[in-house]
Amino acid sequence: AKDPVRILVTGAAGQIGYALVPLIARGTMLGPDQPVILHLLDIPPAAESLNGVKMELIDAAFPLLRGVVATTNVVGACKDVNIAIMVGGFPRKEGMERKDVMSKNVSIYKEQASALDQYAAENVKILVVANPANTNALILKEFAPSIPEKNISCLTRLDHNRALGQVAERAGVSVSDVKNVIIWGNHSSTQYPDVNHAVITTQEGEKPVRAIIADNAWLDGDFITTVQQRGAAIIKARKLSSALSAASSACDHIRDWVLGTPKGTWVSMGVYSDGSYGVPSGLIYSYPVTCAGGEWTIFQGLSIDEFSRAKLDATAAELVEEKAMAYLCL
Ligand code: NDP
């Protein structure tokens, strides 16, 4: 039998946390033969609610769940964790400037980074979900010097999955027959959902999305804005932000990172930029990646047309600006 893997979820009493922990405990993230121990962290005002989540996890009698640590102590939460999913963050409240939110999150991520740096298991893999996700991940990297940058990522898989979903709906095919869309850049409204290299599996083999959905105006227009603004559309409809889909995508992100991407398939992950595709290095930028042996690799060599180039650059420019703002808050 496998040894249990320790998985930290911060902000675990929140909406996404509540949707995420049962997926992990059921084996959706790491597979049906991988026991897990959940470390749940939240802030003191949420302690009672966090304990309620722990009670429900016990009541659900998940066979793979070997233990639950529910705590408001950052150091205790980070001790020996193999995977850390950072969902907790300070939400933007009405009347708050972007810089105020940034400043709150910079201090949260600084503290949690030091705790992970000192107490997490060697080779801990980190996924940042809380917004501004790319920049929070960058702060985390700065303050966790012993954790290699290849172990730090942010979530753009929800945007990626949204793009797959939109293409499948439009083409009238199953979402499992669509692959290789790309989300470039920031997890924000400047992100660029790109279908230029995406394919649909048909009875005659794989066909480019643009050959099946012949409506370029839609692909270059409403498709992009729908994916970019899907989060706001969910809030409008549900009066709450997306939690089910965010949690599901976080599972997909970790599963593919740990267990590998299928042959011929890439996914989108926010990772530390090495300058690939003409993006400034030193940003956490969403790229197409393949994963094998627990490591991601940026997929290289895709052609970037002029339309795409401008969009890759615009979202990079926003990240450069966010990075500068974050450093002012340090
Ligand atoms: P959610 O669980 O809905 O969201 C948590 C974070 O995920 C937010 O930063 C949110 O950003 C981001 N997020 C939301 N939807 C998406 C999406 N679709 N894709 C990507 N990211 C998304 O928030 P709750 O308020 O329910 O829960 C937050 C928890 O964090 C609470 O339990 C709170 O106590 C805890 N917390 C922890 C802190 C800490 O660790 N020090 C500090 C503050 C809070 P956005 O706000 O932009 O939607």
Image (spheres, rainbow, N blue to C red):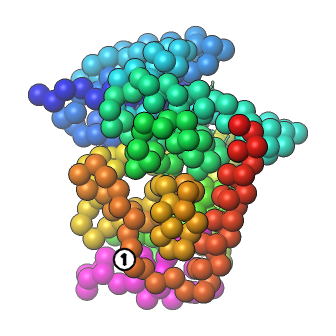
Q: Magenta residues?
A: 192-220
Quickly name the residue at label 1.
200
Is 165 placed left or right of 313 in the picture? Answer: left
Residue 164: x, y in percent? Answer: 46, 65
Please name the amino acid that badge 1 sits on. Answer: Ile
Q: Reply yes or no: does residue 302 show up in magenta.
A: no
Say which quadrant the C terminus sits in: top right
Q: Eyeballing the image, is 158 above or below 307?
A: above
Say which quadrant the N terminus sits in: top left
Identify the residue at image location x=80%, y=38%.
100
Foreground of the two, 327 or 120: 327
Identify the residue at image location x=40%, y=50%.
150
Identify the residue at image location x=56%, y=21%.
42
Outermost residue, front side? 145
Residue 10: x, y in percent? Answer: 52, 28
Dot 1 lies on which element? strand
Residue 315: x, y in percent? Answer: 65, 65
Foreground of the two, 61 or 324: 324
Residue 179: x, y in percent? Answer: 38, 69
Q: Reply yes or no: does residue 194 show up in magenta.
A: yes
- Asked if residue 290 can be seen in this view, the reply is yes
